Amino acid sequence: MEARIIALAVPMFFGLIALELWWSKRRGVSAYRFADAVTDLACGIGSRVFHLFDAALLIGLYALVFESLAPMTLPTDAPLTWVFAFVAVDFLYYWWHRSSHNVNALWAVHVVHHHSEDYNLAVALRQAMFSQATSLAFYLPLALLGVPTAVFATCQAINTLYQFWIHTELVLKLPAPLEAVLNTPSHHRVHHGINPRYLDRNHAGVFIVWDKLFGTFEPEGEPVVYGVVTPLRSLNSLWANFEHFVTIVRLLPHARGVGEWLRCWLDTPAYRPAALGGPKSAPEVERARFVKYDPPLLPGVRPYVAVWFVVVSVAVTLLMPLAPTLWPPVLGILAALLLWTLLGWGGLFERKPWLAASEFARHAVLALLLLAHAAGLFEGLLPSAPAALSLAFAAATAGSALWLHRLLQPLGPGGVDARAPGADSGIADPASHAPGVVAP
């Protein structure tokens, strides 16, 4: 249910992003940077690809608890059921979201959404692969209270859709009564800030009243600096999902005893073992002096990535409703190809040394699979399509490989640089003196 609703909303998402881009240009505001925005969207695509596998399991677990343990069932045709479920979903979302900022293991998942140093509608789609898995436990009380599975899934999807539009700097303030009750762009900008006064504030989904009731509300005042206290400094959307887990693991050798070991996982993200000097504090930041991570791109990267972005976006949108009908190994191969494509975008943006070999291999594998599909080798495993169409896509893939070759040719036989000129791909943590974590 949730996947279908999100799939139907995809055209709306891209339409509003295009509108925001046009509006920001008219106002002379630089709201988007190409590589950062594509990385945001790549994280969202990666999240959707991962949910092709866990969505049925997670909603199935909710349904199992509902059918086995709920002492009563709320009627789906009663308006009060929907009102209660919608408010309750938002209330529990608040606690999941607040916990995700205050428990390091949960932050390792959620941090993906906060990595961007811009704030626009593309950031709304920057979602983590494992978010659904961490949030389900917070929603299971609804199953015990008798909220039917379809009602829960629909309300959760609407809650997610609502939060899309609040990721913008172009809407300043709504009328005061709405600002008092609803989560708005102004409130949510605060949530994405790394200014010390803004950290861990405004966790609401739809209703900002939860933050006001539980002491986590902060109004927007000083200009917001976006991102995370320890910057990711990478445009690799897959690495973004694992980087903070690696950071936690690198703290463990410095932990003294079980207590500190557990606190590395369960304390706040600011926690550091005593051997590393204890908890780190967030430094003061000024928006005017903050330097965003923005490595220069090779000529021709933008159109190349844009074309593949369209291909991948269409493929994922079509695959979401088809996923339950596909044989798992086939679904796994398709998902791997999609994630492989996302990996290549990050490599291109940062001129990684493995890029050329990875991208040419991906083209070869994709072309071979398309030729096999044209020959009918996947009959019964994949939706049928005219052989001529598969051959045309195989030819287009070969053309893309030639395009890539021309794009990389100016770099010479030495291959691709390990990093873009002037770009820093490492992560330093001077406050804790923890070892740096370098993006692959």
Image (tube, grey):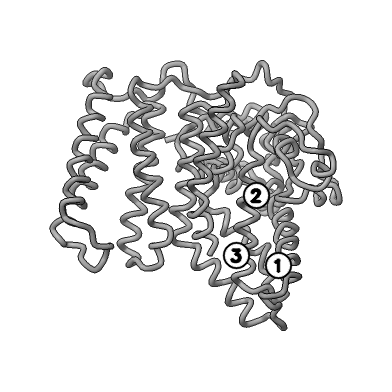
Looking at the rendered structure, the secondary structure element under dot 1 is helix
User: Horizontally, is 33 left or right of 147 in the view?
Assistant: left
Residue 54 sits above or below residue 290 on the image = below
> Which circle marks residue 82 in the picture?
1
Provide residue 63's location: percent of width, then percent of height: 58, 74
Q: Are marks 1 and 2 in contact (CB under 8 Å)?
A: no
In which quadrant will I find the C terminus? top left
Provide residue 129's location: percent of width, then percent of height: 51, 51
Task: Identify residue for label 3.
Answer: 153
Task: Report how far apart the C-alphas of labels 2 and 3 lie in the structure.
Answer: 14 Å
User: Horizontally, is 197 left or right of 404 in the view?
Assistant: right
Callout 2 amino acid: Tyr
Callout 3 amino acid: Ala
Provide residue 166's location: percent of width, then percent of height: 66, 41
Pointer 1 or 3: first along the chain: 1
Residue 14 sits above or below residue 159 on the image = above
Which residue appears at 33% of the width and 29% of the height? 353
Looking at the rendered structure, the secondary structure element under dot 3 is helix
Task: Report how far apart the C-alphas of labels 1 and 2 lie in the structure.
Answer: 16 Å
Q: Residues within 10 Å of mark 2 (few under 14, many from 20)?
A: some
The image quarter in which residue 72 lies: bottom right
Callout 1 amino acid: Trp
Which residue appears at 41% of the width and 34% of the height? 346
